[in-house]
Amino acid sequence: MINFIGELNYYKGAGIIPNFSELSRRYDKDRRTLKKYYEHGMIPKRKKRIYKSELDDYINIIKVKIADSANTLKGIYEYLLDIYDIKTTYNNFKAYCRRHDLSVKKVNKVPHLRYETPPGEQLQTDWKEDIELVNRHGEVFKFNIFSATLGYSRKHIFIYSKNRTEADFLRCNISVFRKLGGLPKKNKTDNMSAIVNVSSKNRKIKHPRILQFEKDTGMKIVLCQVRSPETKGKDESANRFLNRLYAYNNDFEDLNDLLRIIERLNVRCNEEINQFTNVPPDVLFQKEKEYLLPLPNDKVLDSYLDNFVIAKVPTTLLVPFKGNGYSVPKEYIGSNVKLVQESNNLYIYFNTKLIALHEISNNKVNYRLEDYSEGLKARMKNADVDYNELAMNNLERFNKRG
């Protein structure tokens, strides 16, 4: 090595071009390497190839989302997958974030010991409380999500709810039962004021209606120990999926869009492989559903929905409730929907899907902007019309009339 470098330096200094083929034979080196060394004083390094990542186009979005401590990496990834249809895998997304020093580090040092329950034995339920998101038009949405998880399969069900009253607890449970097609033997939940009172002797007493609900359904409601969330850790884990909602802050259109996002998160979390069982919840649920108790009679379940009616959606999109009309999306024209009143809110369902939510009103006509705008667009089919602006102008006239 030293000999051929010295010889090349000698030729270079003397201005002599050596016989590179001869040098190659003597030093057993490639003549092209020797020539490059002679011309450049060293063997030039190859330029490192810079690979462009698909995520480079979204790095500013990722930085904004990750700056919000409510977000998780998985939530941001799901957001990019949903909104921008990225092709990058989650593992590559995590690696990209590490390379760019983008990470959310949250360490929980409290041990949560795992335990298992037989199929059909237990449902764990909880509220994801006081979620607040802003849509892209600046409108603030404050709501809760009732989260239910089957203990064996980890099958998750998420139900949107404005409030957390006793009636909401019962309505959400009934929605979960109908989505599952059955119910478990036990429901483990918090000591929420919606279902229990605490006596002067610190005894927990279930509300009479909750006790009757247990008798009518055959499902026992088991109360967790106070300040012990690990006793229903499987549902607490499900709440981590719901943290992905925060990635959509300022990036959704309206309530319909928000409900679609919640439904999509629900579907995805049941399709993902569970870290403990190594199987997606949907797969294990195929076994667990065989062990669920049969659904009670519809009349029994509906008796716990304080005020409900079944109505067919007319072409006006307005379904009647207590003398007034409330709108639903246009795709449900001709379908039968169920209207359920809880407090001052009217939930409208198609089968088990929540399709609209209204505040109870004294107005004869109650259109949501998105429903009215969709209806105009389907009827007029004019690309030059701003349907949202036209809808807002028409709805203002309705509001003035009352």
Image (cartoon, helix red, strand yellow):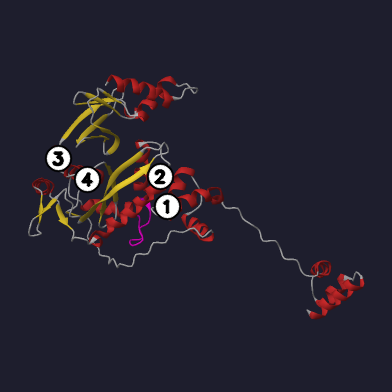
In the rendered structure, which amino acid carries the disc numbered 3?
A: Tyr
Disc nearer the start of the sequence (4/3): 4
276 drawn magenta: yes
Q: Distance from label 2 to label 4 (Cα)? A: 23 Å
Q: Distance from label 4 to label 3 (Cα)? A: 15 Å
Pointer 1 and pointer 3: residues touching (CB < 8 Å)?
no
Residue linked to disc 2: 249
Disc nearer the start of the sequence (2/1): 1
| Residue extent of the magenta highlight | 269-280
Q: Is residue 358 above or below residue 201?
A: above
Q: Secondary structure at mark 2?
A: loop
Of residue 80 and residue 85, the one placed in the foreground of this image is 80
Q: Position of residue 57 (x, y in %)?
A: 55, 48
Pointer 2 and pointer 4: residues touching (CB < 8 Å)?
no
**Circle 1 or circle 3, nearest the eye:** 1
Assign the N terminus to one quadrant of the image: bottom right
Of residue 313 and residue 323, the one placed in the foreground of this image is 323
Q: Distance from label 2 to label 1 (Cα)? A: 10 Å
Residue linked to disc 1: 68
Q: Distance from label 1 to label 3 (Cα)? A: 40 Å
Disc nearer the start of the sequence (1/4): 1
Pointer 1 and pointer 4: residues touching (CB < 8 Å)?
no
Q: Is residue 60 left or right of residue 347?
A: right
**Label ID, residue 304:** 3
Residue linked to disc 4: 164
- Local crowd size for mark 3, using a 10 Å CA cut-off: few (<14), some (14–19), many (≥20): some
